Image (tube, rainbow, N blue to C red):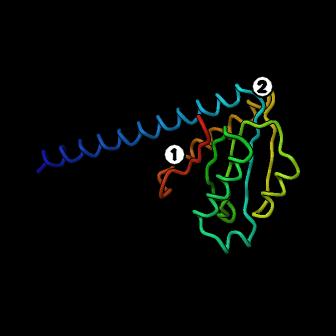
């Protein structure tokens, strides 16, 4: 019986290592992609939230498509992930996008769904300030609590 427990635990340990390695590899790939975008030039860090009407009248998959389509219109180079607010659990997305600026017209396009927060990433100091957030984005992207991959990628 003890030998069976050891064998079972060895299997579980092995499976846990595989999952951990896969999560680590995913995090490394995500960080490399963001670093590539930052090295290409100016980037924006976005928070895309949804208004009450959008949240109550659409599905999570539909909202995900809104985010993907809007980001794709802005640039081919982006990484975004879903997140939920600590206080109210409100669904929103965070993104790093290779873009110099958001026009008023582009902002209006998003505003029909909700609200847009924009933070410019232009200098080394900005990179340092956003390091914590990039780590957070990475951690959210590899959470096992999501039903599917939480990350939305543009071109590599």
Q: Is residue 8 above or below residue 34?
A: below
Q: Position of residue 134 (x, y in %)?
A: 65, 38
Q: Secondary structure at mark 2?
A: helix
Q: CA–CA distance between discs 1 and 2?
A: 26 Å
Q: Residue at x 75, y 63 (%)?
A: 113
Q: Position of residue 91 (x, y in %)?
A: 65, 61
Q: Picture quarter containing residue 65?
A: bottom right
Name the residue furthest right.
104
Give the labeled residue for mark 2.
124
Q: Residues within 10 Å of mark 2 (few under 14, many from 20)?
A: few
Q: Residue at x 35, y 39 (%)?
A: 18
Q: Is residue 27 left or right of residue 129?
A: left
Quarter placement of the C terminus: top right
Give the labeled residue for mark 1.
142
Q: Position of residue 104 (x, y in %)?
A: 88, 51
Q: Which mark is residue 113?
A: none
Name the residue furthest front.
73
Q: Residue at x 51, y 45 (%)?
A: 142
Q: Residues within 10 Å of mark 1 (few under 14, many from 20)?
A: many
Q: Picture quarter containing residue 7?
A: top left
């Amino acid at each position: 019986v003890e030998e069976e427990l050891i064998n079972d635990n060895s299997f579980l340990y092995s499976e846990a290592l595989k999952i951990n390695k896969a999560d680590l590899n995913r995090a490394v790939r995500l960080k490399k992609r963001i670093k590539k975008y930052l090295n290409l030039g100016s980037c924006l860090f976005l928070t895309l939230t949804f208004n009450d009407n959008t949240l109550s009248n659409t599905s999570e998959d539909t909202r995900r498509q809104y985010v993907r389509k809007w980001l794709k219109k802005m640039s081919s180079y982006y990484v975004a992930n879903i997140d939920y607010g600590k206080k109210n659990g409100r669904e929103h997305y965070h993104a790093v996008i290779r873009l110099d600026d958001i026009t008023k017209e582009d902002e209006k396009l998003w505003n029909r769904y909700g609200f847009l927060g924009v933070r410019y990433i232009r200098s080394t100091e900005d990179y340092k300030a956003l390091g914590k957030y990039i780590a957070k984005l990475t951690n959210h992207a590899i959470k096992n609590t999501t039903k599917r991959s939480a990350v939305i990628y543009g071109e590599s």
